Image: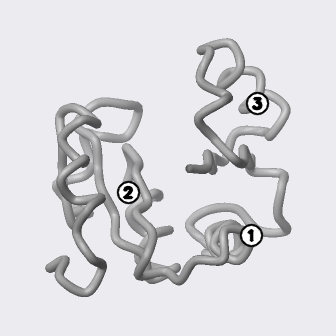
C-alpha cells in the first residue's frame, strides 16, 4: 500500500508515523513529491511503476472528487469513503465503490481486476 496526498510529503509522513501506521505503507508521497499534483495521474503512475503494477491491479481510495478524478485519469479502480474532508461531494463524482468503513473493501481486494465492474 502507498499513501498519496496533495499535502506536503514531510507533513504526510509525520501524520502516518504519528498515527502508528507507517509500517503498513511501502511509500508515502505528498503534493511536492511530483512535478504535478492530483488530479494529474503522474503520481499514481509513478507509484504503480514502483510497485510493478498495472492500473487494473490497483485501487485508489480517497474521500474527495479530486481522488476520484485522479483514479479515473490513471485508469485505476476507485473507492470512495463516506467520511473525510471532501466526502460530501462524492455524489457528484461517484467512485466505483463507496464504503463507510475500510474493512468493507476487503472482499473486493481478492477479486481479480477483470471481474470488477465499473
Task: Say if 80 sits above or below 74 in the image.
Answer: above
CA gap between label 3 and label 2 equals 23 Å
Decide if residue 19 is on the left or right side of residue 114.
Answer: right
Q: State which tag comes first along the sequence, 1 or 2.
A: 1
Residue found at x 30% / y 58%: 109
Which quarter of the picture shows residue 3?
A: top right
Residue found at x 62% / y 15%: 20
CA gap between label 1 and label 2 equals 25 Å
**Depth-wise, is mark 1 or mark 2 nearer the camera?**
1
Q: Which residue is mark 2?
A: 65
Which quarter of the picture shows residue 36?
A: bottom right
Q: Which residue is mark 1?
A: 50
For the residue pair 112 and 8, the one nearer the viewer reads as 112
For the residue pair 72 and 117, the one nearer the viewer reads as 117
The picture places residue 34, in percent across and down from the top left corner, at: 82, 63
Do residues under tags 1 and 3 come within 8 Å of each other at their CB atoms? no
State the quadrant of the C terminus.
bottom left
Decide if residue 54 is on the left or right side of residue 40.
Answer: left
Task: Say if 74 sits above or below 80 in the image.
Answer: below
Amino acid at each position: 500500500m502507498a499513501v498519496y496526498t496533495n499535502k506536503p510529503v514531510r507533513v504526510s509522513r509525520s501524520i502516518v508515523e504519528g498515527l502508528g501506521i507507517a509500517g503498513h505503507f511501502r511509500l508515502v508521497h505528498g503534493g511536492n513529491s511530483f512535478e504535478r499534483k492530483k488530479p494529474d495521474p503522474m503520481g499514481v503512475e509513478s507509484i504503480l511503476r514502483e510497485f510493478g503494477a498495472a492500473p487494473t491491479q490497483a485501487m485508489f481510495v480517497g474521500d474527495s472528487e479530486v481522488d476520484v478524478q485522479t483514479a479515473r485519469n490513471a485508469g485505476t479502480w476507485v473507492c470512495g469513503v463516506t467520511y473525510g474532508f471532501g466526502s460530501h461531494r462524492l455524489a457528484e463524482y461517484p467512485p466505483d465503490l463507496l464504503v463507510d468503513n475500510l474493512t468493507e473493501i476487503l472482499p473486493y481486494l481478492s477479486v481479480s481486476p477483470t471481474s470488477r465492474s465499473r
